Image (cartoon, helix red, strand yellow):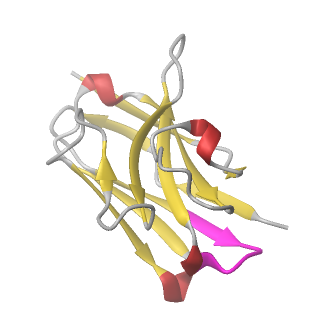
Amino acid sequence: QVQLVESGGGSVQAGGSLRLSCAASGYTYSSYCMGWFRQAPGKEREGVAAIDCNRTPSYADSVKGRFAISKDNAKNTLYLQMNSLKPEDTAMYYCAADLGVFGGRWYSPLEYDSWGQGTQVTVSS
């Protein structure tokens, strides 16, 4: 059974940093495209970053240059380093795994088969 568990969320002032972690179990972790998504109240879930989907990590325009996605295959853990945080980054953050054949849209929630429970990130101005 695939399980994804996020951690590392919290409250931070604008300009601060957080690192999110996603511990994966139940499948061959290193083989699949994985992504981070976020969802703010009243808004749709949006793709933030993905790794091992395309040749290089993919990022939403809104986070390019501020966020970095990485994986530690030995620890079966996905990370999202978030720097220069802004109030508009406030959301519930989810990690997700694409356990099938990558369909080309890393930013689409429909691409992913398994989801974590989410971790809240709140950025105050």
Q: Is residue 111 above or below residue 28?
A: above
Residue positioned most to the bottom:
74
Quarter assignment of residue 10: top left
The stretch drawn in magenta includes residue 23: yes
Pinpoint residue 85: horizontal percent, then vertical percent.
23, 37
Q: Residue at x 48, y 67 (%)?
A: 78
Q: Residue at x 30, y 22 (%)?
A: 88
Pinpoint residue 108: horizontal percent, then vertical percent.
52, 37
Give the mark count: 0
Pinpoint residue 125: horizontal percent, then vertical percent.
21, 21
Q: Nearer the viewer, residue 75 or 120?
A: 75
Quarter assignment of residue 11: top left
The stretch drawn in magenta includes residue 39: no
Q: Residue at x 23, y 32 (%)?
A: 62
Q: Is residue 72 above or below residue 113?
A: below
Q: Nearer the viewer, residue 10 or 49?
A: 49
Looking at the image, residue 22 sits to the left or right of residue 8; the answer is: right
Q: Is residue 71 above or below residue 50?
A: below
Pinpoint residue 60: horizontal percent, then vertical percent.
30, 39
Q: Is residue 39 above or below residue 23?
A: above
Q: Nearer the viewer, residue 78 or 105?
A: 105
Residue positioned most to the top:
42
Residue positioned most to the right:
1
Q: Residue at x 53, y 15 (%)?
A: 41
In which quadrant of the rendered image does the N terminus lie? bottom right
Looking at the image, residue 3 sits to the left or right of residue 108; the answer is: right
Quarter assignment of residue 102: bottom right
Q: Which residues are magenta?
A: 22-29
Looking at the image, residue 67 sits to the left or right of residue 3; the answer is: left
